[in-house]
Image (cartoon, rainbow, N blue to C red):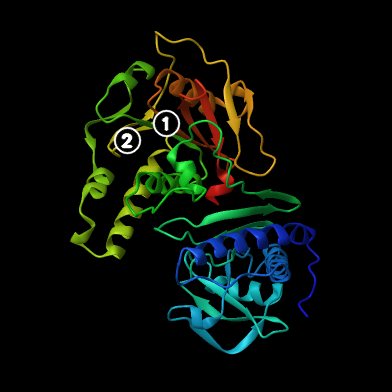
């Protein structure tokens, strides 16, 4: 009885998303996992995406909706906020609700009565593999689910922007030796904890992307100064001694305080660091998160040659890896980051563009070249 979607992209992706959730839920059940969300059928997926899309194009008091919709019965939510009367799932109701639920972590709960979908209230907690649709901006939707382990960012399944559809390829990290941050974003790592190195870099990447000014972070080995040969001196904002706010927090025993305290403190330190990336030039940190400098200008090391090619890929369906000159994938930041990693092969570079693109540069021993992974579809 659920109405068919009029947003064509919803019809196109519904069956693929249904198969994704069915596969993961079946595997989780086989492993004996508990607190699993219900399987979302394609018709439901289509209807929720449709309502979310048309809501995203509307405004309430001059503001576009930024909402998160989760498909689950209220009894699976912990301490839900329950409406006295069920509301119909449609763009009008979603737009009216949006101002009250736009803060991060709040989900609009949607379930069915056997015939129609309805909104039963809101929740801050959802079960594992719960189908979620986020409205990020007008016309931009992200389908995701909570990762089975750990904290932080949800795992993205698909990104829809108007008529553009990006389905995340979970095997998109199969080429070469991929950085751990990409593996974690694809949910291919084992248990991933609050202070896991990949999770911290993911949160840093999300925060960098959020300020919208573009920026670059160069991650260098803790006990090496080789990177200094690839930086133009003097560095305007070099730090002596290094700033250890984030590093000290990561090193502390998490049993010393509550989980909520740690996550709040971690976010504060990450946002502090990410803010510095808005300053023109690169921010340099160690792989143990000590801040060495920001606003640094990079240059080709004396012993090195100009980089001529990189392997570029995006972990989405039909996103085949291609060999290109680094100037082909972005501007000065991208070219500088690629050259830096080419010179400093134990380093990692994270580059955010003002237009929202985000790229990781790393050296592949397997491929003997710099590889660039565009991951903005995974960070939304």
Q: Residue at x 69, y 52 (%)?
A: 161
277 to 18, vertically: above or below: above
52 to 86, vertically: above or below: above
Q: Residue at x 20, y 51 (%)?
A: 252
Q: Residues within 10 Å of mark 2 (few under 14, many from 20)?
A: some
Q: Residue at x 55, y 42 (%)?
A: 375
Residue 220 numbered mark, or none: none
Q: Residues within 10 Å of mark 1 (few under 14, many from 20)?
A: many
Direction from residue 135 to residue 302 in the image, left or right: left
Q: Is residue 373 visible?
A: yes
Q: Please report contact status of discs 1 and 2: CB closer than 8 Å, yes or no.
A: yes
Q: Could you tell me residue 220's position as x and y percent?
A: 34, 29
Task: Give the residue at mark 2.
Answer: 287
Q: Is residue 330 visible?
A: no
Q: Could you tell me residue 30's position as x and y percent?
A: 51, 64
How many angstroms separate mark 1 from mark 2 (CA)? 9 Å
Q: Element type at marker 2? A: loop
Q: Quadrant of the N terminus?
A: bottom right
Direction from residue 318 to residue 63 in the image, left or right: left
Q: Element type at marker 1? A: strand
Q: Nearer the viewer, residue 81 or 297?
A: 81
Q: Nearer the viewer, residue 311 or 307?
A: 311
Task: Give the residue at mark 1.
Answer: 348
Q: Nearer the viewer, residue 101 or 290?
A: 290
Q: Could you tell me residue 22's position as x and y percent?
A: 62, 64
């Amino acid at each position: 009885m659920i109405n068919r979607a009029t947003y064509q992209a919803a019809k196109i992706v519904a069956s693929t998303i249904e198969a994704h959730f069915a596969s993961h839920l079946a595997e989780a059940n086989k492993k004996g996992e508990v607190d699993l969300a219900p399987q979302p059928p394609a018709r439901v997926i289509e209807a929720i995406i449709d309502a979310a899309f048309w809501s995203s194009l509307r405004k309430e008091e001059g503001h576009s909706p930024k909402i998160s919709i989760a498909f689950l019965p209220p009894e699976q939510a912990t301490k839900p906020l329950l409406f006295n009367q069920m509301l119909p799932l449609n763009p009008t109701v979603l737009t009216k609700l949006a101002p009250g639920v736009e803060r991060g972590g709040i989900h609009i709960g949607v379930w069915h009565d056997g015939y129609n979908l309805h909104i039963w209230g809101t929740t801050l907690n959802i079960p594992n593999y719960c189908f979620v649709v986020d409205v990020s901006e007008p016309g931009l939707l992200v389908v995701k689910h909570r990762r089975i382990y750990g904290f932080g960012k949800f795992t993205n399944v698909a990104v829809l922007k108007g008529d553009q559809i990006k389905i995340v390829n979970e095997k998109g990290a199969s080429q070469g030796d991929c950085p751990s941050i990409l593996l974690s974003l694809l949910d291919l790592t084992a248990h991933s904890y609050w202070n896991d190195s990949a999770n911290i870099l993911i949160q840093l990447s999300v925060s960098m992307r959020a300020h919208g000014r573009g920026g670059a972070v160069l991650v260098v080995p803790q006990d090496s100064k080789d990177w200094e040969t690839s930086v133009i001196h003097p560095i305007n904002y070099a730090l002596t001694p290094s700033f250890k706010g984030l590093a000290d927090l990561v090193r502390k025993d998490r049993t010393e305080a509550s989980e909520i305290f740690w996550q709040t403190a971690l976010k504060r330190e990450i946002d502090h660091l990410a803010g510095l990336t808005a300053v023109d030039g690169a921010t340099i940190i160690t792989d143990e998160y000590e801040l060495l400098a920001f606003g640094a200008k990079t240059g080709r090391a004396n012993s090195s040659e100009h980089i001529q090619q990189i392997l570029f890929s995006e972990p989405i369906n039909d996103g085949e890896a291609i060999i290109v000159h680094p100037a082909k994938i972005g501007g000065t930041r991208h070219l500088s980051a690629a050259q830096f990693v080419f010179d400093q092969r134990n380093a990692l570079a994270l580059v955010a563009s003002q237009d929202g693109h985000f790229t990781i540069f790393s050296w592949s021993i397997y491929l003997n070249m710099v590889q660039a992974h565009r991951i903005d579809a995974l960070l939304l």
